[in-house]
Image (tube, rainbow, N blue to C red):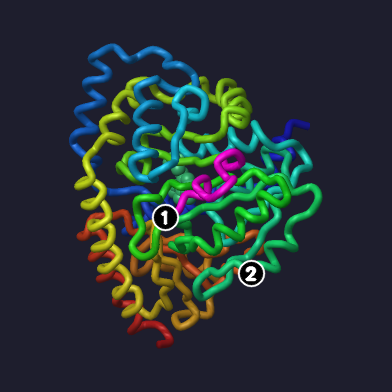
């Protein structure tokens, strides 16, 4: 009998995409998937046209066009003093952070290896591990501030542990890991010879605290695979251009897999990405100010509607608790909200290995125009009057 593979069978379609589809069908305001509904910077649009017209339309070097790798190395040093990256041997340009994470796991882990993943998590990491044949070991971040329990983290390390995934600023909670927490992780990595896979895609969206790349802690550059992307910082999630920074030794594994997975990211978009990476500080300041304003519109509206809100210190999501509003579980309530009052979210259970941990939660994404957020706020305002509060 024809069937899909056991690996493919072992995970389901992304719930985020399902919610988005339902939202489109119902004409709901979508605060489900994390992509901007506003345009990318005009400089980037012009740079794409220029790149196509300059005939950058054939395969680039598989691990990335040289000007882009040079720009990545320069931007890394510019924002993180002392982090020196060799553009020829330590950078691989990939099709977004999504490809970066799976290419890194496939290139650096073996079937049966264990990889620690904090939960709640960005929903790709579990399937990435499964496709690699690795076994994800989940460690819960504890509310209200999504704290790591050091004993639980230590207990998750076994003789088979080879890696740990760290995403800061964090999707879905908006947590920004503290230096102390990162030092705890770094200490375990050094002690047990682990590879850290860091997803730094929200590095420029920090409202409170500081983004500290794990690779910059003592002894970590050689064992950290730092994954980043154009998607969020430059509002171009559709470009599919990202990068992986790792030691020359680890980069060999990442590049080998990347070659066969995708050959390379789109050549004209790689050229155009340089225009983003070389933008002046004022661009990053305005980006952050814009997101802070969006956050400050959405959060009070959610609270007024009856949600308990975890105030995000970074990234562009608000995790909420629905217990004051309903006895429904997260999925039922999320479907109901799409129909009436017409706002799409993501059910909390999609961010946990054990769905029950997310049953009372919904995630709202706010990379949206203020008018979109205000429209969502108006619709949600009707909830408080019809719910139990
Ligand atoms: N990593 C995290 C934590 C994300 O939230 C997302 C998108 O929402 C991605 C990776 C996807 O990144 P990319 O578009 O670069 O593949």
Location of residue 65 by image quarter: top left
Compare residues 81 and 57 and report the one nearer the observer: 81
Q: Which of marks 2 and 1 is nearer the N terminus?
A: 2
Which residue range is magenta in the image?
212-224
| Residue sticking out furthest to the right | 159
> Could you tell me which secondary element the residue under label 1 belongs to?
loop
> Could you tell me which secondary element the residue under label 2 belongs to?
loop
> Residue 67, how many percent across, how many down?
35, 22
Query: Which numbered circle lies on residue 211?
Result: 1
Q: Which residue is drawn at 23% across and 56% down?
A: 290
Left or right of residue 49: residue 81: right
C-alpha span from label 2 to label 1: 20 Å
Q: Residue at x 28, y 49 (%)?
A: 37
192 to 210, vertically: above or below: above
Q: Is residue 17 visible?
A: no
> Residue 278, how many percent across, how many down?
27, 34
Q: Does the magenta stretch include residue 328?
A: no
> Residue 233, how many percent across, how many down?
33, 45
- Total marks shown come to 2
The quadrant in which the C terminus is found is bottom left
Q: How crowded is mark 1: few (under 14 residues within 10 Å), some or many (20 or more)?
A: many
Q: Is residue 43 visible?
A: yes
Q: How crowded is mark 2: few (under 14 residues within 10 Å), some or many (20 or more)?
A: some
Location of residue 118 by image quarter: bottom right
Mark 2 CB near ligand 1 (8 Å cut): no
Query: Which numbered circle lies on residue 149?
Result: 2
């Amino acid at each position: 009998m024809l069937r899909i593979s056991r690996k493919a069978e072992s995970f389901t379609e992304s719930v985020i995409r399902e919610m988005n589809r339902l939202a489109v069908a119902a004409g709901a305001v979508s605060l489900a998937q994390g992509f901007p509904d506003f345009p990318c910077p005009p400089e980037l649009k012009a740079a794409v046209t220029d790149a196509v017209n300059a005939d950058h339309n054939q395969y680039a070097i598989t691990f990335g066009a040289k000007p882009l790798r040079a720009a990545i190395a320069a931007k890394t040093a510019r924002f993180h003093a002392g982090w020196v990256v060799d553009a020829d041997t330590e950078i691989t340009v990939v099709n977004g952070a999504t490809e970066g994470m799976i290419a890194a796991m496939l290139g650096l882990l073996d079937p049966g290896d264990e990889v620690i993943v904090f939960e709640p998590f960005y929903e790709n990491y579990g399937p990435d591990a499964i496709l690699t044949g690795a076994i994800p070991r989940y460690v819960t971040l504890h509310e209200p501030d999504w704290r790591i329990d050091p004993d639980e983290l230590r207990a998750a390390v076994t003789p088979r542990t080879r890696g740990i995934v760290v995403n800061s600023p964090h999707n879905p909670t908006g947590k920004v890991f503290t230096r102390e927490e990162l030092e705890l992780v770094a200490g375990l990595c050094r002690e047990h010879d682990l590879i850290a896979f860091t997803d730094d895609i929200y590095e420029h969206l920090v409202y409170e605290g500081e983004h500290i790349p794990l690779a910059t802690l003592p002894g970590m550059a050689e064992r950290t695979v730092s994954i980043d992307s154009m998607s969020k910082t430059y509002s171009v999630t559709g470009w599919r251009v990202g990068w992986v920074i790792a030691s020359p030794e680890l980069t060999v594994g990442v590049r080998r897999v990347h070659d066969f997975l995708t050959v390379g990211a789109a050549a004209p978009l790689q050229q155009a990405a340089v225009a983003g990476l070389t933008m002046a500080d004022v661009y990053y300041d305005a980006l952050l100010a814009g997101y802070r304003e969006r956050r400050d519109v959405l959060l009070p509206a959610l609270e007024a509607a009856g949600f308990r809100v975890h105030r995000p210190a970074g990234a562009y999501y608000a995790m909420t608790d629905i217990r004051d509003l309903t006895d429904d579980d997260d999925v039922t309530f999320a479907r109901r909200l799409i129909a009436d009052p017409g706002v799409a979210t993501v059910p909390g259970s999609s961010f946990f290995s054990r769905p029950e941990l997310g049953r009372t939660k919904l995630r709202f994404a706010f990379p949206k125009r203020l008018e979109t957020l205000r429209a969502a706020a108006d619709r949600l305002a009707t909830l408080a009057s019809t719910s139990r509060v």
